[in-house]
């Protein structure tokens, strides 16, 4: 048995792949300690982890149309985040005698896990929930959005290096980097050294039953009818206008549409057509297992899940990494990008098109099979076991 410490970042999209890894390590008989805020403690306990709850300030969603007030508050929060990082690092260092890990796995946004590991002289593993970032990746994003001259200025000034994933401690100090993606979705793969292992998709196995405590979804209809799942994520989500537009477009069709609206209250959508269901949150994996298509924001977890299940995708990205993932999925032939401001009928037409396209189906079959061979959580766990085995024996590594 080896003792691992996991430091996730308290956002749903960051927690999901870390839970899959934690479950795999626990099933292999290892001791898995997790430091996380109370709202995410339960999902780690359910898979056999020992959880230390720490107070991490909740991160809210980024509204589609940010007001001046929101932008000002965001600037004010930057100082609070800096202070919080120092506080959490101190708390972990103080608790280190209780935790005593052989290896630390820290989300690149959970910098307190990395700093505490460095202070204790314990090897740490950087955990990327989306594709890995390098200066070349970020410069390419600037080049695509603002042009080559802007990219040249950014390179000359070194501005790209302030991005969290390029901090010296996150990149140069890591013994290993686990990246929750597949090579096909990793930009500038050649700019990463051998420590970077692309182990995605990190996802849990979905239970066979559709029974889920606390939800009121019509699982019999989802099983029986032609279903489309619509999700714009939990961070850079969309407002009521977008969801209403999609609902109206699919009204009266033979599609059953299940929407996850996140920070948007479904009540804001008004009375919905009989074939459209809206909830703030739904058990995404269980729903997707029973769908025929996916209208997605192209977040990495969702993109990988869609590929693993062989689902044709219509992609409506918002954040910069989502735009890159959507471009790559479209280039690979796995889906279609539709701008969010498009008329509702464009989304219906795109869904019908990708579902009927045999080339899309063949591409998805090929990618899904390739992803099965990558191993996901098992491959990541094996890399961690090898790293731990290569370390000198110490109290945290018990047999």
Image (tube, rainbow, N blue to C red):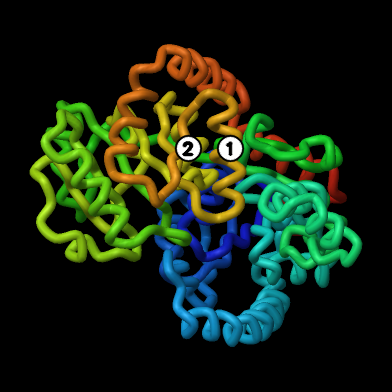
* Residue lying at 85% horizontally and 61% vertically, measured from the top left: 153
Please tell me the numbered disc located at residue 327. 1
Q: Nearer the viewer, residue 235 or 169?
A: 235
Q: Tell me the quarter of the image containing the C terminus.
A: top right
Q: Quadrant of residue 95?
A: bottom right
Q: Please name the residue shown 24% across and 32% down the image.
A: 227
Question: What is the number of the mark on residue 275?
Answer: none
| Residue appearing at x 58%, y 37% in the figure | 327
Per the model, the C-alpha gap separating discs 1 and 2 is: 7 Å
Q: Looking at the image, is 302 positioned above or below residue 142?
A: above
Find residue 372 and report its horizontal and vertical position in percent.
54, 23
Q: Residues within 10 Å of mark 1 (few under 14, many from 20)?
A: some
Rate crowding at label 2 as few (under 14), some (14 to 19) or many (20 or more) other CA atoms within 10 Å: many
- The quadrant of the rendering that contains the N terminus is top right
Measured from the top left, where is residue 370 in percent x and y?
58, 20
- Earlier sequence position, callout 1 versus callout 2: 1
Residue 234 image position (x, y, % from top left): 42, 58
Q: Nearer the viewer, residue 156 or 184?
A: 156
Badge 1 marks a residue whose secondary structure is: helix
Dot 2 falls on a residue whose secondary structure is strand
| Visible residue check, residue 325 | yes
Residue at the disc numbered 2? 337
Q: Measured from the top left, where is residue 56 in percent x and y?
A: 54, 76
Q: Quadrant of residue 286?
A: top left
């Amino acid at each position: 048995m080896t003792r691992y410490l996991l430091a996730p970042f308290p956002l749903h999209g960051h927690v999901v792949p870390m839970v899959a890894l934690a479950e795999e390590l626990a099933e292999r008989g290892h001791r898995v300690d997790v430091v996380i805020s109370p709202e995410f403690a339960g999902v780690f306990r359910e898979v056999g982890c020992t959880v230390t709850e720490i107070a991490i300030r909740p991160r809210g969603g980024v509204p589609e149309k940010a007001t001046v007030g929101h932008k000002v508050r965001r600037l004010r929060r930057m100082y609070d985040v800096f202070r919080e990082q120092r506080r959490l690092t101190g708390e972990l260092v103080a608790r280190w005698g209780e935790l005593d890990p052989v290896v630390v796995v820290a989300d690149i946004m959970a910098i307190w896990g990395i700093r505490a590991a460095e202070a204790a002289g314990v090897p740490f593993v950087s955990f990327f929930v989306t594709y890995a970032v390098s200066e070349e990746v970020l410069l390419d994003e600037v080049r695509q959005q603002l042009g080559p001259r802007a990219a040249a200025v950014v390179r000359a000034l070194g501005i790209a290096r302030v991005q969290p994933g390029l901090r010296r401690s996150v990149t140069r100090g890591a013994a290993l980097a686990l990246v929750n993606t597949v090579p096909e979705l990793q930009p500038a793969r050649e700019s990463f050294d051998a420590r970077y292992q692309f182990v995605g998709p990190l996802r849990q196995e979905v239970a066979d039953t559709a029974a889920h405590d606390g939800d009121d979804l019509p699982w019999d209809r989802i099983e029986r009818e032609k279903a489309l799942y619509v999700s714009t994520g939990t961070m850079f989500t969309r407002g009521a206008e977008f969801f209403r537009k999609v609902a109206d477009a699919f009204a009266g069709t033979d599609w059953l549409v299940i929407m996850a609206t996140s920070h948007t209250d479904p009540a804001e959508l008004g009375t919905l057509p009989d074939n459209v269901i809206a909830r703030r949150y739904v058990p995404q994996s269980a729903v997707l297992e029973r769908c025929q298509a996916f209208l997605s924001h192209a977040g990495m977890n969702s993109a990988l899940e869609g590929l693993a299940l062989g689902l044709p995708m219509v992609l409506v990205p918002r954040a910069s990494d989502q735009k890159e993932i959507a471009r790559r999925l479209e280039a690979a032939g796995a889906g279609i990008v539709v701008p969010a401001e498009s008329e509702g009928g464009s989304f219906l037409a795109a869904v019908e098109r990708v579902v009927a396209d045999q080339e899309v189906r063949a591409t998805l079959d090929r990618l899904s099979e390739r992803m099965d061979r990558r191993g996901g959580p098992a491959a990541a766990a094996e890399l961690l076991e090898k790293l731990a085995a290569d370390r000198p024996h110490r109290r945290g590594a018990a047999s």
